[in-house]
Amino acid sequence: MPLRTTRLMLAEEPGAIEHAAEVLLDGGLVAFPTETVYGLGALGLDSDAAGRIFEAKGRPSFDPLILHIAHAPELERVAEVNEAAWRMAERFWPGPLTLVMPRSTAVPDIVTSGLPTVAVRVPAHPVAHALLEAVGEPVAAPSANPFGKLSPTTATHVRTGLSGRIDVILDGGPTARGLESTIISVAEDVPVLLRTGAIPAEEIEEMLGVRLERHVPTSRPATPGQLDSHYAPHTPVIVSTEPVADPSRTGLVVLRKTGVEKDFAAVEELSADGDLTEAAKNLFAALHRLDALGLDLIVVRPVPETGLGAAIMDRMRRAAFREDE
Ligand code: AMP
Ligand code: MG
């Protein structure tokens, strides 16, 4: 792909959002903060523009994109919306919930990877919101990282991964949630949890009054965030409670320190209070830091799989997965 000059701009810089919106309207690529992770945006109803996202990320064409809109009523332009979708939108938008619904004819095939459904959300981050309002069009935006790698929670992560491949990075500081959106399909009669994420499944089930069906991943998944290997650092990762052969060459990720970590080369404590919301927010940045140390191994100690713990452990297992396993 042709090399691009990547311009890093502070989101609060006067004119930054307007500039980024113009770049998008011209068919360019803009990375921007959302409350989950940084997204890599392009015009979502323009197949050439959306195609550039796949090129820049090295993303396979079977991995569909999420459309981001400024306001829930814009849903009707891109999807066939049913009652369940409106209820969830009303409760959780703006916010880290992605809804999968039957698509409208306005949505190009490249965005949905040819699927009959489209994924949509309304982000809550003020910079994302201002950008979407300035563009006035749906913006397709997967995470702003090379395909399969650790998700970006700071503008620096984006620059390290995609510099020279995209036009603008809007720096709005570290993201608040640190985990991708929860994805729910409301395309069928029964709502299905396609990806765990920043809103715990239990919270959605409580609101709907039904248990969500769980999607069973296959090797060509409906939701490629569900690929076995994903969110992966360069350094090998294992999720384990076992002692480690050479702690001096090993980085450790723990929810909270217990005092037995001193032999490790580096330790990342996700939350001194054992708070899973704080742990989720720190997770990817902790892995980025350990990965930068060039160690032999990263060991992750499991966290409880309730609430956000389910999404945290999902990301950790995919970071740890190796093809030869
Ligand atoms: P990313 O933003 O990189 O985490 O990727 C967006 C996620 O949304 C991917 O895992 C996609 O597969 C998923 N997604 C997008 N569109 C659909 C759809 N129509 N059906 C199921 N999953 C989808
Ligand atoms: Mg991603």
Image (cartoon, rainbow, N blue to C red):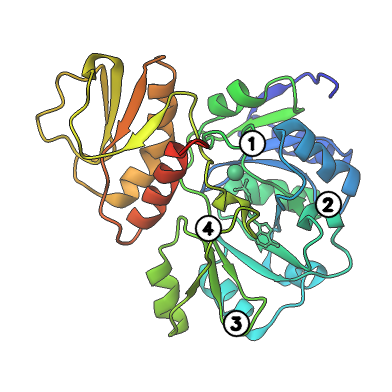
Dot 1 beta carbon under 8 Å from ligand 2: yes
Q: Are marks 2 and 1 in contact (CB under 8 Å)?
A: no
Give the farthest residue toward the left.
259
Q: Visible in this render: residue 15?
A: no
Q: Nearer the viewer, residue 214 or 308?
A: 214
Q: CA distance from mark 1 to mark 4?
A: 21 Å
Tag 2 residue: 110
Q: Residues within 10 Å of mark 1 (few under 14, many from 20)?
A: many
Q: Nearer the viewer, residue 15 or 108?
A: 108
Q: CA distance from mark 4 to mark 2?
A: 23 Å
Which three-letter amino acid code belongs to the residue tagged 2?
Ile
Of badges 4 and 2, nearer the viewer stands 2
Q: CA distance from mark 2 to mark 1?
A: 16 Å
Q: CA distance from mark 2 to mark 3?
A: 26 Å
Residue 99's spot in the image, x, y percent?
62, 67
Q: Pick whichever of labels 4 and 2 is earlier in the sequence.
A: 4
- Above/below status of 43 relative to 3: below
Circle number at residue 96: 4
Q: Secondary structure at mark 4?
A: loop
Residue sitting at 82 percent across and 37 percent down? Answer: 52
Residue 22's spot in the image, x, y percent?
83, 38
Circle number at residue 138: none
Which three-letter amino acid code belongs to the residue tagged 1?
Phe
Tag 1 residue: 147
Residue 29's spot in the image, x, y percent?
77, 35
Residue sitting at 72 percent across and 51 percent down? Answer: 132
Q: Nearer the viewer, residue 96 or 298?
A: 298
